[in-house]
Image: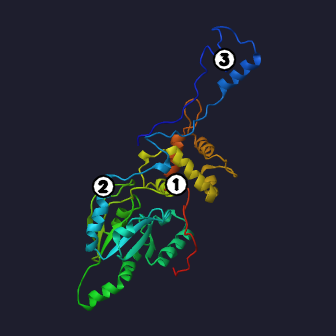
């Protein structure tokens, strides 16, 4: 991944000027021993990294808009293919179940029955996931938590889909029609649509990579039970109105890292984690509570603990940022959910 190093050490004071700008004759010794001592101290002081720089190539995270041309085509394909399916299977990230939902999906899919799959449940807080399942069911949607890597929960998918379409299936059976269920799989980039299909489908493989934007066309897959799944490319929406949503999508990898300021993103993630998961940070990076107030200082402390130093002793904050984001996304910090339902829902689980 191409990145730009942002650690800049302060250079030496220009020759021929005093600190206040007054000229100094070249070669003339400084008579004040106290000033000489201070300069000697500075020469031995370990330089510190500068704070992350906002540039046009790596803008402030709140201004990020990532909507490649193929996403616009995907929106059209979804609408065109809707008449071919009986239900919509929406894959969301269990760590951010609300932020990882495309707000345009309701208008795109109309009144088609919806089954929400909370994928990557192994990376999310279990208690929070149960609350989200109740939340979606209270909204009139079927919901199921799965972990596509281990297969946990995936065996409940087809029974849940048949239950969602029970009236339609009974209608087919009453007419003697041996009709297979067809469902469209939708979701934003990098929530695991292809991984889910691969777990369910043993007759073929959808392309899977741990980066957004891999699937570029609609593909049909037939499961052993006869159920047919239409895989669609991940699609975001044209403009992020909520900065918090944009940050959560960036944290989980739904937006390409190449268009983000990684150090700023790492600081924002630390701000979120320190509020709800400080003990996990302390355990993983051998930190002491209370944590440092400045997330920039906290990032440097994490880099120092991991020995991520540049020549001269400055902290390699870019490397520390990449490490922090990778370990969060890989679940090495623990099971972490970044958002919760607005209110407790009492629908039956």
Q: Residues within 10 Å of mark 3 (few under 14, many from 20)?
A: few
Q: Give me the disc on residue 328.
A: 1
Vertical placement of 41 versus 220: above or below? above
**Which numbered disc covers residue 18?**
3
Q: Are the residues at dot 1 and dot 3 in contact (C-beta closer than 8 Å)?
A: no
Real-space Cα distance between discs 2 and 1? 29 Å
Q: Which mark is residue 65?
A: none
Residue 108 visible in the snapshot: yes
Give the color scheme: rainbow, by chain, secondary structure or one colour: rainbow
Q: Is residue 124 above or below residue 301?
A: below
- Toward which corner of the image does residue 209 lie, by quadrant? bottom left
Which structural element holds mark 3?
loop
- Which image quadrant for residue 200? bottom left
Q: Is residue 48 left or right of residue 201?
A: right
Q: CA distance from mark 1 to mark 3?
A: 48 Å
Picture coordinates of residue 87 (x, y %)?
33, 75
Callout 2 touching callout 1 (CB < 8 Å): no
Which one is in front, 114 or 133? Answer: 114
Name the N-terminal-most of marks 2 and 1.
Answer: 2
On residue 70, the disc is: 2
**Quarter of the image holding residue 144?**
bottom left
Secondary structure of residue under mark 1 = helix
Task: Give the SS element for disc 2.
Answer: helix
Horizontal side of residue 347 vs 162, given as left or right: right
The first of marks 1 and 3 along the sequence is: 3
Category of crowding for the residue at label 2, using alpha-carbon neighbours closer than 10 angstroms: few (below 14), some (14–19), many (at least 20): some
Point 41% across, 50% down: residue:
256
Q: Position of residue 23 (x, y in %)?
A: 64, 13
- Percent of width and height locating residue 95: 50, 63
């Amino acid at each position: 991944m191409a990145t730009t190093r942002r650690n800049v050490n302060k250079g030496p004071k220009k020759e021929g000027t005093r600190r206040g700008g007054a000229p100094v004759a070249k070669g003339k010794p400084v008579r004040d021993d106290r000033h000489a001592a201070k300069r000697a101290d500075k020469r031995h002081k370990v330089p510190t990294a500068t704070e992350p720089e906002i540039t046009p190539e790596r803008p402030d995270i709140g201004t990020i808009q990532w909507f490649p041309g193929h996403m616009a085509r995907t929106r059209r394909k979804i609408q065109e293919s809707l008449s071919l399916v009986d239900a919509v299977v929406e894959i969301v990230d269990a760590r951010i179940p609300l932020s990882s939902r495309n707000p345009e999906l309701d208008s795109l899919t109309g009144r088609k029955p919806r089954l929400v799959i909370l994928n990557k449940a192994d990376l999310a807080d279990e208690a929070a996931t149960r609350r989200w399942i109740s939340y979606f069911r209270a909204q009139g949607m079927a919901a199921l938590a799965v972990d596509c890597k281990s297969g946990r929960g995936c065996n409940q998918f087809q029974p849940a889909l048949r239950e969602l379409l029970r009236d339609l299936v009974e209608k087919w059976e009453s007419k003697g029609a041996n009709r297979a269920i067809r469902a469209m799989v939708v979701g934003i980039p990098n929530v695991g649509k292809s991984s889910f299909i691969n777990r369910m489908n043993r007759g073929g493989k959808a392309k899977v990579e741990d980066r957004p934007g891999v699937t570029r066309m609609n593909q049909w897959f037939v499961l052993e039970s006869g159920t047919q799944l239409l895989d669609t490319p991940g699609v975001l929406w044209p403009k992020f109105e909520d900065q918090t949503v944009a940050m959560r999508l960036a944290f989980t990898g739904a937006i390409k890292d190449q268009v983000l300021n990684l150090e700023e993103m790492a600081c924002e993630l630390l701000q979120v984690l320190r509020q709800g998961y400080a003990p996990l940070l302390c355990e993983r990076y051998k930190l002491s509570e209370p944590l440092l107030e400045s997330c920039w200082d906290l990032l440097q402390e994490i880099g120092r603990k991991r020995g991520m130093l540049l020549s001269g002793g400055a902290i390699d904050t870019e490397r520390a940022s990449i490490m922090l984001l990778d370990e969060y996304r890989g679940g090495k910090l623990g099971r972490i959910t970044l958002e919760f339902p607005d209110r407790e829902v009492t629908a039956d689980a």
